[in-house]
């Protein structure tokens, strides 16, 4: 059984068409063909802020929830190659809403759809609670929501922890708040909905953002004038080491969320829901250059970076060999995994040998 036919070039989508695939009996049989709804919660990265190097939220090209285009791939775009009727993606670039009160209220229901990410979003500022409210309201406009298989991607970490450079994050009060808010969000989602695949996304080593900023005179000047990323803007090498150490701790906590929820769901007899840690960004960034960042603020991911992250998430979801991550390396030329009729999204449990997963051509 070939899980992946091949790896296609990242600049264009060149995977072969597939025949109709029978509906899954449970979450472990979920194929890209089956996904009908996409959703995302997060911060300014998922809102797409400055991805086009301006003050817009480029929500239409947001890596995990934007509609995407032939020359700007996103997770919904990739899913739509197998189900052209996938719903929920954000479809338009917009300005952040109610800037004076961010992150609160940064949602444009007519075009954001099920992209409820808020610029400056933070669990400690109540974003996960607020975004859950947006999701539950917005989901009602999809008549077949309950019957569709859904993918929900959650990445909310940077604004809660980009200042944690001087000591272990797990000893802080704001870590406890983030932890409890994440648990509450996952409880809400798994209680309210069925047919649900939840991505918990790990974070790259943020010291690399600092490295890129310091490599360009203009970026250094910008971040002397504005405090956008906490100690990422001004930290020394010792602080950057502590920041990366704390990001690793938080990524490990994401895995524990997933493991704990796998146990809970199994005990409850739930075979329609999976909570999965997606580790494709863990430890990455040392080879990134200035093109990974917006030219406006040298902080948020560029459009190029959004596509890299979209393909990384797609590849990770389809990767069952978690020991090697199927050789996934998030680079400018990251290849796209092409699923076959036998491919399924990883839901936890046993991994399979990487030799059965892909053939590079």
Image (cartoon, rainbow, N blue to C red):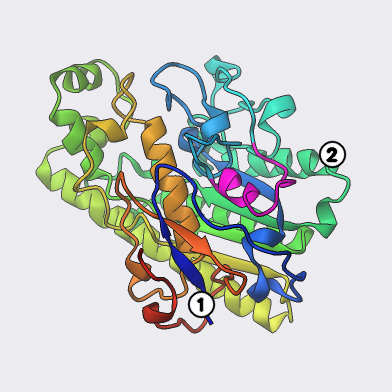
Q: Is residue 319 magenta?
A: no
Q: Residue at x 37, y 35 (%)?
A: 304
In the rendered image, residue 271, in percent from the top left (x then y), is placed at 71, 76
In the rendered image, residue 168, in percent from the top left (x then y), is placed at 27, 55
* Contact between labelled residues 2 and 1, with CB atoms less than 8 Å apart: no
Label 1 element class: loop
- The dominant secondary structure in magenta is loop
Q: Residue at x 52, y 42 (%)?
A: 74
Residues at marks 1 and 2, CA–CA distance in whole angstroms: 38 Å
Q: Find disc 1 in the rendering and name its residue.
A: 2
The total number of labels drawn is 2
Corner quadrant of residue 183: bottom right
> Is 98 rendered above or below residue 183?
above
Compared across the picture, whether 270 is left or right of 170 comes to: right
Q: Residue at x 47, y 27 (%)?
A: 49
The magenta segment is 75-89
Q: Quadrant of the C terminus?
A: bottom left
Q: Is residue 84 magenta?
A: yes
Instruction: Pick the residue in front: 207 or 279.
Output: 279
Q: Residue at x 17, y 44 (%)?
A: 239
Compared across the picture, whether 157 is left or right of 38 comes to: left
Corner quadrant of residue 359: bottom left
In the rendered image, residue 240, in percent from the top left (x then y), is placed at 18, 45
Are there few (<14), some (14-19), or many (20+) residues within 10 Å of tag 1?
some
Looking at marks 1 and 2 on the same chain, the residue that comes earlier in the sequence is marked by 1
Callout in the foreground (1, 2):
1
Q: Find disc 2 in the rendering and name its residue.
A: 141
Instruction: Pick the residue in front: 217 or 33.
Output: 33
In the rendered image, residue 338, in percent from the top left (x then y), is placed at 50, 61
């Amino acid at each position: 059984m070939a899980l992946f036919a091949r790896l296609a070039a990242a600049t264009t989508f060149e995977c072969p068409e597939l025949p109709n695939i029978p509906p899954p009996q449970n979450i472990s049989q979920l194929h890209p063909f089956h996904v009908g709804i996409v959703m995302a919660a997060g911060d300014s990265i998922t809102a797409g802020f400055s991805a086009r190097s301006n003050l817009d939220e480029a929500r239409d090209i947001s890596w995990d929830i934007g509609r995407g285009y032939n020359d700007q791939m996103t997770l919904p775009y990739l899913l739509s190659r197998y189900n052209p009727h996938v719903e929920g993606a954000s479809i338009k670039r917009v300005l952040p809403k109610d800037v004076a009160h961010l992150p609160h209220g940064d949602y444009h229901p007519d075009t954001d759809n099920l992209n409820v990410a808020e610029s400056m979003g933070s669990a400690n500022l109540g974003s996960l609670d607020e975004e859950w409210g947006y999701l539950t309201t917005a989901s009602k406009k999809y008549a077949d929501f309950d019957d569709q298989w859904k993918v929900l991607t959650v990445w909310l970490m940077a604004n809660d922890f980009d200042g944690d450079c001087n000591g272990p994050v797990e000893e802080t009060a704001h870590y406890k708040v983030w932890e409890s808010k994440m648990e509450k969000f996952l409880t809400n989602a798994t209680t309210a909905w069925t047919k649900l695949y939840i991505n918990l996304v790990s974070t790259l080593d943020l010291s690399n953002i600092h490295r890129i900023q310091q490599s360009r005179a203009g970026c250094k000047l910008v971040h002397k004038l504005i405090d956008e990323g906490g100690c990422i803007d001004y930290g020394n090498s010792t602080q950057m080491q502590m920041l990366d150490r704390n990001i690793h701790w938080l990524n490990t906590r994401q895995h524990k969320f997933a493991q704990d929820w796998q146990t809970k769901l199994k005990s409850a007899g739930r075979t329609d829901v999976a909570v999965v840690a997606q580790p494709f960004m863990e430890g990455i960034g040392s080879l990134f250059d200035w093109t990974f960042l917006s030219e406006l603020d040298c902080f948020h991911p560029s459009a190029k970076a959004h596509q890299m992250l979209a393909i990384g998430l797609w590849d990770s979801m389809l990767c069952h060999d978690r020991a090697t991550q199927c050789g996934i390396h998030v680079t400018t030329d990251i290849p796209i995994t092409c699923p076959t009729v036998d491919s399924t999204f990883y839901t936890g449990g046993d991994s399979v040998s990487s030799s059965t997963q892909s053939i590079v051509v």
